[in-house]
C-alpha cells in the first residue's frame, strides 16, 4: 500500500459502503454502540476526499474495552493500542482490505461532537465544502508523501470552519440527528 496522499472526486458509492459497514457494526456491537455515524470527508456529499471510510462509534464508556474490541476484531479490524489520541480508541482495516478507520469515542464528549458538527455544517454549507476540497487537493499535491504535514496544514482551515460551525449551531440549536446505523 502506498503512503502517497491521494484525494479523489466524491464517489456516490461511499454512502452505500458506509451503510453496509454500519449494518455489520450494528450487528456485532448491538447496544454497546449508542451511535454509529459516517464521519469525515466521505460523509459529505460532493466533497473530494481520500477514499477512506471513517466511522465513529459512540459508547457510554471506554471500559470495558473488550465490549467493543472483541466484536470489532471479529469483523477483521485491528485495534491500534498505541494511538496517541487518548480521547478515542482507534481501529483500522487489516492489510490488503479497503481503507476504513473506526473511531470509538465517548458519547457527549467534545471529541465525539466535533466530527458530527463539522460534517453537518459542511453538508449544509456547500461553498465552504468546495473551499475545503480545493485546499485538500492543493495540499495533497504539496505534501504527497507526508501525511502529518498534510494533516497539520489543514488544521487552520478546519478550526476556522469549526468557529463558523459553532456559531451556526448556536443560531439553529443544532443537535446531532439520529444515528446513521
Image: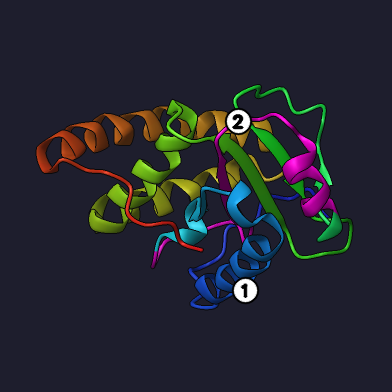
Say whether residue 146 is visible.
no
- In the displayed structure, would residue 115 be above or below residue 52? above
Which residue corresponds to the image point at 23% horizontal and 53% vertical from the top-left? 125
Say how the picture is coloured. rainbow
* Pointer 2 local density, CA inside 10 Å: few below 14, some 14–19, many at least 20: few
Q: How many marks?
A: 2
The residue furthest left is 171
Residue 32's spot in the image, x, y percent? 62, 47
Residue 45's spot in the image, x, y percent? 39, 66
Is residue 15 a member of the stretch shown in magenta? Answer: no
The residue furthest front is 31
Q: Nearer the viewer, residue 115 or 70?
A: 70
Residue 154's spot in the image, x, y percent? 48, 35
Q: Are marks 1 and 2 in contact (CB under 8 Å)?
A: no
- Circle 1 — which element? helix
Say whether residue 27 is visible.
yes
User: Which picture quadrant has residue 76?
Assistant: bottom right
13 relative to 65 in the view: left or right? left
Q: Nearer the viewer, residue 53 or 79?
A: 79
Which residue corresponds to the image point at 43% horizontal and 27% vertical from the top-left? 110
Q: Mark 1 or 2, which is nearer the eye? A: 2
User: Which quadrant is home to the N terminus?
Assistant: bottom right
- Circle 2 — which element? loop
The residue tagged 2 is: 61
Give the numbered dot on residue 20.
1
Which residue corresponds to the image point at 24% horizontal and 57% vertical from the top-left? 124
Residue 166's spot in the image, x, y percent? 24, 32
Marks 1 and 2, Cα distance to the nearest angstrom? 25 Å
**What span is in magenta?**
45-73
* Pointer 1 local density, CA inside 10 Å: few below 14, some 14–19, many at least 20: few
Amino acid at each position: 500500500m502506498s503512503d502517497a496522499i491521494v484525494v479523489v472526486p466524491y464517489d456516490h458509492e461511499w454512502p452505500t459502503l458506509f451503510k453496509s459497514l454500519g449494518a455489520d457494526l450494528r450487528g456485532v456491537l448491538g447496544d454497546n454502540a449508542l451511535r454509529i455515524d459516517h464521519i469525515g470527508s466521505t460523509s459529505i456529499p460532493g466533497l473530494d476526499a481520500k477514499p477512506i471510510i471513517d466511522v465513529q462509534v459512540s459508547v457510554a464508556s471506554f471500559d470495558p474495552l473488550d465490549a467493543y474490541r472483541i466484536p470489532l476484531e471479529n469483523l477483521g479490524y485491528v485495534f491500534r493500542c498505541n494511538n496517541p489520541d487518548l480521547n478515542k480508541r482507534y481501529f483500522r482495516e487489516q492489510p490488503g482490505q479497503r481503507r476504513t478507520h473506526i473511531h470509538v469515542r465517548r458519547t457527549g464528549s467534545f471529541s465525539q461532537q466535533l466530527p458530527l458538527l463539522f460534517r453537518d455544517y459542511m453538508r449544509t454549507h456547500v461553498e465552504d465544502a468546495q473551499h475545503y476540497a480545493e485546499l485538500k487537493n492543493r495540499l495533497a499535491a504539496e505534501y504527497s508523501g507526508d501525511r502529518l504535514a498534510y494533516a497539520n496544514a489543514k488544521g487552520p482551515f478546519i478550526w476556522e470552519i469549526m468557529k463558523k460551525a459553532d456559531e451556526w449551531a448556536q443560531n439553529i440549536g443544532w443537535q446531532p440527528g439520529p444515528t446513521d446505523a
